[in-house]
Amino acid sequence: MPSDRLLLRGRLLTFSAEPQSPDDTSAFDYIEDGALLIENGLILRRGSYCDVVAGAGDAEIVDHRPKLLMAGFIDTHIHFPQVQIVASWGAQLLDWLNTYTFPEETRFADEGHAAAMACRFFDLLTDHGTTTAVAYCSVHKASAEAYFEEAEQRNMRMIGGKVLMDRNAPDGLRDTPQSGYDDTKDLIAKWHGRGRASYAITPRFAITSTPEQMEMAGALVAEHPDCFVQTHLSENKNEIAYTLELYPEARDYLDVNQRYGLLSDKMLLGHSIHLEQREIDALAETGARPVFCPTSNLFLGSGLFDDAGLRSKGIVNAIATDIGAGTSYSMLQTLNEGYKILQLQDQKLHPFRAFHWITRGNAVALGLEDRIGTLDEGTEADIVVLDSRATEAMALRMERASTLAEELFVLQMLGDDRAIDEVYVAGKPQKGKAPAVPQPAPARTRKTPAARERDLVLS
Ligand code: GUN
Ligand code: ZN
């Protein structure tokens, strides 16, 4: 019987901690001529090619040199039913929801539509190098079924949940406190912990949930403390004002979630931009995770996420696309816009911290760093192969790059799906482009043999 062992050769980069400064080389392991031995969807060995190949037996060898192998990217906040309203013109949050988003999400009552969109959604994720995501499905149970079915087919580690929303939304897009509870219970029973799936209890945001529904959400969290919890928090000033009208007894926006017992380190709070001091203290105390969504925050004009301010309190921030208010599926483009949002506040996003963030950092925010987000032995073989010369502009810039940090910054600012040369999900290639033997560089990079040589001396 042929072995299902696979040996991937290339330059390897993986993080063991968050880099504390631009020269904190102790936070990562970089191997110039490295190899990963993969079996049964797991990384069995990581090391120099010479060492790993010696114990690889009859493993199939795939040579990705001079490309860079990293852990697959993790997107911690994305809306699966919004794939067809990305780039919808002219509105800020509440108008955008009413004009584009809610009408679109009503279409996901149709199982066939949800299944077709799930297929396209997962293709887009892997094309952009994302191997794990935390998604909001629509209010319809069928949309969550379609989402988890498709993830299971592809053996992807995915987290998600149907949104709970019982008011301030059109007909066909509301549940009730009881039906939302019942559907969520059924979905958790069926999917949570099945294969690579995990469930996220998902009250959409305070404006679309009555106090009765928030109470039911609290009951779900108490009954399933190992599930994730996700919602939106303090994204937009009009949203905050309306929330406080709807919940006059709440101390602040976060308190709407806190008083129903939703906060813990399993909770992801999308946006978390306009926060009061009490809310920041409560995030620090409970370990709940703010999620920075740069392309969305710029697109909707929502505001500037205070990454350094929150981090200085010991809060663990995640980062995400927030498609469809976000404008790119690419976590590289997400870093690009994130860099600029932090620049506007005189904060810095160094490439080592940036690449840590979209891999191990987001895994830590999810408590999954023992399974995903690194190239460590024993973890799941979700891997991206990055081409820092994927476009003419990148190739030209790379002619003047001499360090790994410079190369990563080129990927961070100029990279997108074109820079994703291959993606492995549990050890299986998704793009089908993996060459069995080294191939000449594709014509579009116009890479000379001398340039390929230069790849190998980057350090
Ligand atoms: N707040 C409540 N729902 C949404 C949504 O779908 N997208 C964004 N960006 N914010 C929200
Ligand atoms: Zn969102």
Image (cartoon, helix red, strand yellow):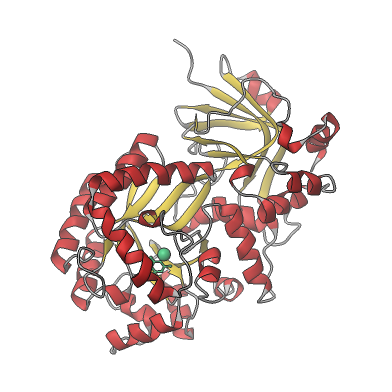
Which quarter of the figure is the N terminus placed in? top left
In the figure, residue 348 lies in which quadrant?
bottom right
Classify residue 388 as left or right of residue 267: right
Classify residue 331 as left or right of residue 94: right
Residue 174 place in picture, x, y as percent? 21, 66
Task: Looking at this view, name the residue that lies furthest to the front.
Answer: 89
Residue at the (63%, 57%) spot, across then down: 354
Q: Give ligand 1's quarter of the image.
A: bottom left
Residue at the (61%, 63%) spot, across then down: 337
The answer, for residue 174, to whether it is visible in the render is: yes
Up the image or down, 298 lies above or below 416; here it is below
Up the image or down, 299 lies above or below 131; here it is below
Depth check, front residue: 60 or 340: 340
Classify residue 91 as left or right of residue 389: left
Depth check, front residue: 165 or 58: 165
Classify residue 299 as left or right of residue 234: right
Depth check, front residue: 5 or 112: 112
Residue 290 place in picture, x, y as percent? 47, 68
Depth check, front residue: 174 or 233: 174
Which quarter of the figure is the C terminus placed in? top right
In the figure, residue 246 lies in which quadrant?
bottom left
Residue 5 place in picture, x, y as percent? 52, 21
The answer, for residue 32, to whether it is visible in the render is: no
Residue at the (54%, 44%) spot, across then down: 129
Residue at the (31%, 55%) spot, across then down: 161
Task: Looking at this view, name the residue that lies furthest to the top.
Answer: 1
Residue 374 place in picture, x, y as percent? 56, 44
In the figure, residue 149 lies in which quadrant?
top left
Up the image or down, 257 lies above or below 423; here it is below
Up the image or down, 377 lies above or below 110; here it is above
